Amino acid sequence: MSGNDQSLPASNRQKPSGAQNRATGGFLASFGVSVEPDLLKQALTHRSWAYEHGGAPHNERLEFLGDSILGQAVTVKLYTDFPDVSEGELSRYRAALVSSVALAEVARGIGVGPELRLGRGEQLTGGREKDSILADAVEALIGAVYLSTDPATAAQFVRDLIGPLLDDPERLTVSLDPKTGLQETAAALGLPNPAYTVVGEGPDHGRTFTATVELDGVVGTGVGTSKKAAELAAAREAVLGLRDRDRSRGRTQR
């Protein structure tokens, strides 16, 4: 794509053919969107790769754009689909849906990881599975779709991305924001905020972390390639364990 094309409105730019789109990002084919090849390549380029290749364009500007589009589309979607939910609850839903955990889950679901262009260091440390890198790439892809098409198409793309996460609203706090859910449970029980114990193992380029958290006698354990990922997994297990216990007690009492 030439520099002149970049400055044109999306409606006047030459769109890539279906074959071009599949060749540069087949994981987007099911969404029915055509992304300009140069923008798609940029959206999938991490700054570590750009640094190793003479300061080539990377995805941070597209991420900035996509973050804004994502927030607006999610807000409208939640407002429309949950007419009886309070503002506070809607805010929690939105925070969960735009979190790195949620966006990383989306990225894994559509196969973004293998498409990323990463520097050697990030490849050696499992960058294709890092929540932060995957989430940033999803936001950059949203930005690329916006620039390649139009606002309505970009908003629909966002709705298609988050649709599976909205199938079960309870997952918004259990699976996508489990640490907040566990803190709220602790507060409701009059207990202090849960404390996490994290242990790292393995070499620096392939380190794994195991986190443990306990609340009201229920223990959650999680493993991840970062401390944050391990803590989220542990919190998720603890929240689910507490809910299963409470449901079991309810059935016993009846």
Image (spheres, rainbow, N blue to C red):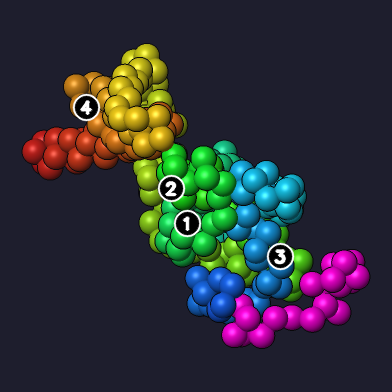
Between 158 and 20, the residue placed more toward the observer is: 20
CA neighbours of label 4 inside 10 A, class few (<14), some (14 to 19), many (20+): some
The residue where tag 3 is placed is 39
The residue where tag 1 is placed is 113
**Whether label 3 touches label 2, CB < 8 Å:** no
Amino acid at the residue labelled 3: Leu
Amino acid at the residue labelled 2: Glu
SS class of the residue under badge 2?
helix
CA neighbours of label 3 inside 10 A, class few (<14), some (14 to 19), many (20+): many
* Residue 183 percent coordinates (x, y): 40, 26
CA neighbours of label 1 inside 10 A, class few (<14), some (14 to 19), many (20+): many
CA neighbours of label 2 inside 10 A, class few (<14), some (14 to 19), many (20+): some
**Which quarter of the rendering shows the N terminus?**
bottom right
Give the image quarter of residue 80.
Answer: bottom right
The residue where tag 4 is placed is 219
* Residue 11 percent coordinates (x, y): 82, 78
The residue where tag 2 is placed is 129
**Which quarter of the rendering shows the C terminus?**
top left
**Whether label 1 touches label 2, CB < 8 Å:** yes
Q: Earlier in the sequence, mark 4 or mark 3?
A: 3
Q: Earlier in the sequence, mark 4 or mark 2?
A: 2
**Whether label 4 touches label 3, CB < 8 Å:** no
Give the image quarter of residue 51.
Answer: top right
Between 193 and 125, the residue placed more toward the observer is: 125
